[in-house]
Image (spheres, rainbow, N blue to C red):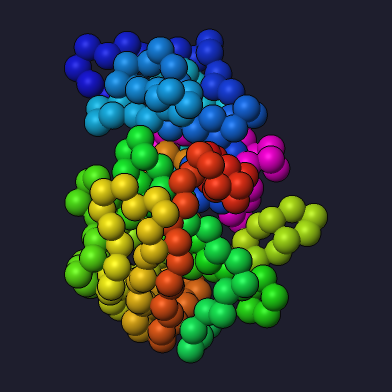
């Protein structure tokens, strides 16, 4: 906590939030809540989406979770869309001892799923002009029930045309770029996934992606020999390894897709909060 910051007020409780499809916490109205309006170091944009700055400290108690430093982070389980009603803590509640995703990748005896490629039957490419971020999601819900997604913060040093990313240098699911995957996708009665993974090895080649005003242009992004390990991610951005978690490998995948505006594309509005 910052010097001079007021203590957490145990008399107030945050509104419930749920994780959307790209792991952002949203309230019942669908607005992003990494922090809450009126708090110090919390900025809300024109869409009423709120993002915390460095040094942010929550002012309210987290519902259903103790505030002492020795507490463990509740396991949120499966990735769920924002209409399920799961209440999740918005702040770090302590280390569970599993190791953070930024740590070296631990050895695992968990199951391994191997794919030559992902033959996706649905995709979504959503560019947010406000912060220059691009969210891409492709999934196979006809056969393997898996998905691959990546975030590229173009205005914050994210890769563009001509760049090749070595995923062994991408330690955590944070800006300016990272790749994650999902397995065990179920679409009924609501969309969910059994396991979430973070890529830790392989290459991503950006054959074509425009940094400035990419909406309406095409992106051509190639994935080579991607390896990902199972992780748990929380609404506060915390990411932890899963002991002896599952592993996923994807030998090759080429995405040749148009870039859409998060605020005008129907899929982006429905799934990415546009």
Could you tell me residue 20's position as x and y percent?
Answer: 57, 45
Left-right relation of 43 to 139: left
Range of residues picked out in magenta = 76-94
Image position of 113 with respect to 45: above or below: below
Image position of 260 with respect to 220: above or below: above
Image position of 131 with respect to 64: above or below: below
Left-right relation of 224 to 82: left
Could you tell me residue 220's position as x and y percent?
Answer: 36, 71
Task: Kindly give the residue lying farthest to the bottom in the view shown.
Answer: 116
> 161 or 227, which is in the foreground?
161
Question: Looking at the image, which residue is at 48% across and 44% down?
Answer: 262
Q: Quadrant of residue 86?
A: top right
Could you tell me residue 42's position as x and y percent?
Answer: 35, 22
**Can residue 80 be seen at all in this image of the molecule?**
yes
**Can residue 103 be seen at all in this image of the molecule?**
no
> 100 or 192, which is in the foreground?
192
Question: Looking at the image, which residue is at 53% across and 58% down?
Answer: 124
Left-right relation of 162 to 129: left
Question: Looking at the image, which residue is at 32% across and 38% down?
Answer: 131
Left-right relation of 102 to 185: left
Residue 99 highlighted magenta (yes or no): no
> 201 or 153, which is in the foreground?
153
Could you tell me residue 57's position as x and y percent?
Answer: 33, 24
By secondary structure, the bulk of the magenta-drawn segment is best described as: loop
Q: Quadrant of residue 173?
A: bottom left
Residue 87 highlighted magenta (yes or no): yes
| Quadrant of the drawing holding the N terminus | top left
Question: Looking at the image, which residue is at 46% across and 77% down?
Answer: 247
Task: Kindly give the residue lying farthest to the right in the view shown.
Answer: 189
């Amino acid at each position: 906590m910052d010097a001079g910051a007021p203590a957490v007020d145990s008399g107030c409780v945050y509104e419930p939030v749920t994780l959307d499809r790209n792991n952002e916490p949203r309230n019942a109205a669908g607005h992003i809540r990494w922090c809450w309006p009126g708090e110090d170091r919390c900025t809300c944009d024109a869409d009423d989406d709120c993002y915390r700055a460095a040094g942010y400290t929550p002012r309210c108690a987290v519902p259903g979770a103790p505030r002492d430093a020795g507490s463990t982070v509740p396991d949120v389980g499966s990735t769920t869309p924002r209409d399920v009603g799961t209440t999740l803590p918005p702040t770090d509640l302590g280390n569970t001892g599993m190791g953070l995703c930024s740590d070296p990748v631990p050895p695992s005896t968990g199951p391994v799923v191997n794919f030559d490629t992902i033959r996706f039957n649905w995709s979504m490419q959503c560019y947010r002009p406000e912060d220059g971020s691009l969210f891409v999601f492709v999934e196979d819900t006809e056969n393997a029930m898996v998905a691959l997604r990546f975030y590229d913060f173009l205005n914050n040093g994210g890769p563009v045309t001509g760049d090749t990313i070595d995923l062994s240098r991408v330690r955590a699911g944070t800006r300016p770029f990272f790749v994650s995957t999902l397995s065990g996708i179920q679409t009924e009665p609501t969309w969910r996934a059994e396991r979430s993974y973070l890529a830790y090895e392989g290459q991503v080649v950006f054959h074509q992606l425009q940094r400035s005003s990419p909406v309406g242009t095409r992106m051509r992004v190639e994935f080579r020999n991607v390896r990902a390990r199972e992780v748990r991610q929380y609404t506060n951005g915390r990411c932890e390894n899963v002991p002896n978690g599952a592993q996923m490998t994807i030998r090759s995948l080429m995405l040749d897709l148009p870039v859409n505006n998060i605020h005008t594309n129907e899929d982006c509005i429905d799934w990415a909060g546009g």
